[in-house]
Structures are given as structure tokens and as C-alpha cells.
Image (spheres, rainbow, N blue to C red):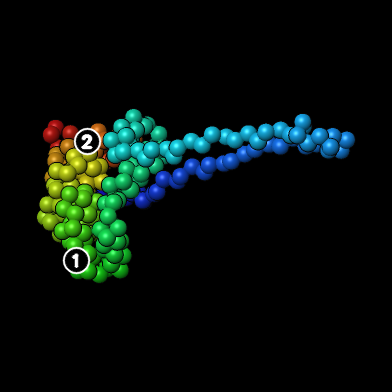
Amino acid sequence: MRRFSLRLALTLPLLPALLFAGTVAAQAPEEQGSTQANEMPVEQIPLRPPAKPKTVDDLLAELKRERNPQAARQIANSTMATWSDSSSPTVNLLMQWSAKAAAEKRNAAALDFIDQAIILKPDFVGAWNQRATLHFTMGNYKKSVSDIEKVLELEPRHFGAIAGLAGILTERGSKDAALKAWERYLEVFPADREAQEIVAKLSEELAGQRT
């Protein structure tokens, strides 16, 4: 969740294609009578097992090391996709219905769907974050903060929830707390230039107020 246009589009990893290849030698016309002597064996490329999906820990370690903003954004998208997959088809469907209802401004239905998802899987960080986002867009900041706190209890490195908290603190005028939240965000996602700019701006404003 975040207000400051963090583009958290969901992406799914692509499975690598496995190619099979073989070669057969061509026979010259005069050698057609002795096929066995001139046949070449088919060479098969050994199959490689599919790459093991990266864990959240793997992705966050990469995100912390990456300094290229575009590459970091791709890692962030993959991380959010991982957090948004409950591994339960029912819960994932409820989340999809909630997102669709929210897009159509049917907020009551959106809340109902996401509430059901949380009941079914109370430790699913993606559902809590989605409900925090919904409350935020509805202006229910107190409820949004409550859900964000639950997200960060389950996953303290959830940079989307941290950004959402920073946004709410900024809107409330709590600049000191907002700055600390953005600094915490950058500890997880250091290559986000937009967040870097926000931190620089807040730091200047607060320094000016103290002089």
C-alpha cells in the first residue's frame, strides 16, 4: 500500500522454456546401402530442473543490494506478488473480488470480501495490506493504521505498508514520524528515488523549522 505512486504492479515469474535438440548426419547417395555404418547417434541435451522460486528473504536481500532503480522496481514487484499470493485459491479469489469491487467504488462489498479472506487466513499479510489500502483510499486513516500495524507485525519489512504509514503521518502533519517511517522504508528499498526525494524534502523542512 502507498499513496506516493509506488508502482506496485503484480508480476508473475516466467518459467524458462526447455528446448530439446538432436542431430542426425545426412547420408551421401552412394552410402545409402550402409546406413548402420553411417548413422550418427541422436544427442540429447540433459534436462535441467526448473529454477527454484525465490523466497521473500531472497528477494528482499536483492532489493537491499540493488542500486539501479528500474531493476529494483522489478524486484519490488516480485516481492509484492509473493506477499499477495495466499497459496489458497479461495482466499486469492476473494482478494480479486475485493479489488474489483474497490475499483468500481463498491467499498462495502470490497470490505466484505477482504474481511472473509482475513477470517479464512488471519496470518496472510497480503489481505491485511489490501484492507489497509482500502481504508486509506476511503479516508479511514485510523482503521488503515490499525491494519498497517498488523501487516508490520506479520512482516516488519513490508515496504508497501511502511510507505502507507508514512503517507498517513504526512497527511496528519506528523513530519518527524513520517521522516522516520520513510527512512525505515529506504532501509528495505534503498533504490527508490521518489522516497529519497521525499526524505530529502522532509529533512530540509524540519531543519528549517528548528533554526
* Residue on which disc 1 sits: 112
The mark closer to the camera, 1 or 2, is 1
Q: Secondary structure at mark 2?
A: helix
Tag 1–tag 2 contact (CB < 8 Å): no
Q: Earlier in the sequence, mark 1 or mark 2?
A: 1
Q: Amino acid at mark 1?
A: Asp
Name the image quarter holding residue 201. top left
Q: Which percent across, then down, holds residue 74?
A: 39, 42
Specify whether residue 205 is in view. Answer: no
* Residue 45 placement, left or right of 172: right
In the rendered view, would you say 4 is above or below 192?
below
Q: Residues within 10 Å of mark 2 (few under 14, many from 20)?
A: many
Q: Which residue is mark 2?
A: 183
Q: Is label 1 in a helix, a strand or a loop?
A: helix
| Foreground pick, 152 / 166 | 152
Measured as percent of width and height from the top left, residue 162 is found at 21, 43
Tell me which residue sits at (22%, 35%) in the image.
183
Question: Would you say residue 161 is visible in this rendering?
Answer: yes
Residue 150 is situated, as x and y percent measured from the top left of the image, at: 14, 48
Task: Judge by depth and name the residue closer to the eye, 89 or 85.
Answer: 89
Q: Quadrant of the C terminus?
A: top left
Q: Which mark is residue 181?
A: none
Quadrant position of residue 22: top right
The correct choice, above or below, for 94 with respect to 65 in the image is below
- Structural crowding at the residue carrying mark 1, measured as other residues with C-alpha within 10 Å and reported as few (<14), some (14–19) or many (≥20): some
- Please report the residue visible at 34 percent of the width from the left and 33 percent of the height from the top: 62
Expressed as whole percent of the image width and height from the top left, the position of residue 165 reads: 18, 47
What is the C-alpha distance between the residues marked 1 and 2?
Answer: 34 Å
Kindly identify the amino acid type of the residue bearing the numbered disc 2.
Glu
> Closest to the observer: 53 or 139?
53
Give the residue at x 28% y 51%: 87
